[in-house]
Every structure is written in structure tokens, then in C-alpha cells.
Image (cartoon, rainbow, N blue to C red):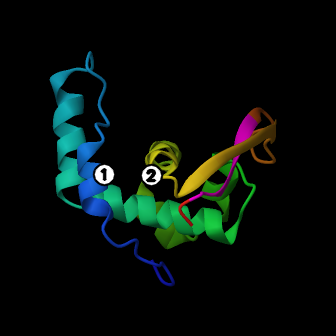
Amino acid sequence: MEGVRVLKGQGSLFGQNPIAHTNDPVTSHLAADYVTRTGKRGTHVTLVVNLVRAYPGMTACELWQLGSDPDRRELGELQEIRRRLTDADAALLVKQGPARKCRVRGSTQVTWWRGDAE
């Protein structure tokens, strides 16, 4: 994650926001606890926020494609960008912009921009 700016003090913030739904199976809650407790959630939010800073106005799929190979290896899958964008949005670090046709998938998707806490 070369060049990634670490977001200070976000561990407690992300620890308070549940990421598994009430009706999700117990395995989802265990996974959510693990990703938060180990710091992966915060690390991934930082990575995704930095992608939005570098490429404002992109869709999640475009951000995935624009990320470096090490970024994609760290995140593991496209869905992880979507999950962490939601976390970053809740923390006002990014915000949703207007929807438009995604250059990668061709479907209509929201764009992502720097948040108000920036």
C-alpha cells in the first residue's frame, strides 16, 4: 500500500458501526468481528478512501480497476471496495455522487467523491 495515507483514530469508529445485519447468519457476525478486530476493516477503508482521493468521480468498479495490483491483492475482491465505501461514507470520508454509466461494467452506478470530513 505504497503512498497510502493512514486515517488516524478510525479504529474505534469502525468498531462501533455494525457491518453484519441482524438477520445474517452467525458466520457473518463472526467474520465482521474478525475483520474489525484485526484492523483489516480500517486498513481497507484507508485504501479505498485514498483511491477516491486519487480518482474522484469514479464508480466502485472503476476504482477496483484503477487500483494497483497490491491494492487489489489486499482487498481480495471487488465487493470489498463496495463494503468499505459504505463504511467510509458513514464516517463522512467519502460521499456518493450522481449515478452514471460505469466505464467498466456498462451499468448505471453511483460515483464516489471526497467526503465532508475531508
Instruction: Of the two numbered discs 1 and 2 on the same chain, state the one appearing first in sequence.
Output: 1
| Residue toward you, 22 or 2 | 22
Q: Which mark is residue 14?
A: 1
Residue name at image x 40 percent, y 71 percent: 7
Left or right position of 118 against 99:
left
Q: Is residue 27 above or below residue 117?
A: above
Type of amino acid under label 1 = Phe
| Residue toward you, 60 or 15 | 15
Q: Is residue 67 visible?
A: no
Residue name at image x 57 percent, y 71 percent: 68
Most prominent secondary structure in the magenta stretch?
Answer: strand
Q: x and y percent of residue 78 in the render? A: 53, 47
Q: Is residue 37 above or below residue 101?
A: below
Q: x and y percent of residue 50 in the render? A: 55, 69
Left or right position of 10 against 3:
left
Residues shaded magenta? 109-116
> Does residue 2 show up magenta in the picture?
no
Q: Residue furthest front?
A: 116
Left or right position of 79 against 103:
left
Type of amino acid under label 2 = Ala
Q: x and y percent of residue 57 in the render? A: 75, 55
Residue under pointer 2: 91
Q: Residues within 10 Å of mark 2 (few under 14, many from 20)?
A: some
**In the rendered structure, are the residues bearing label 1 and label 2 in contact, judged by CB atoms less than 8 Å apart?**
yes
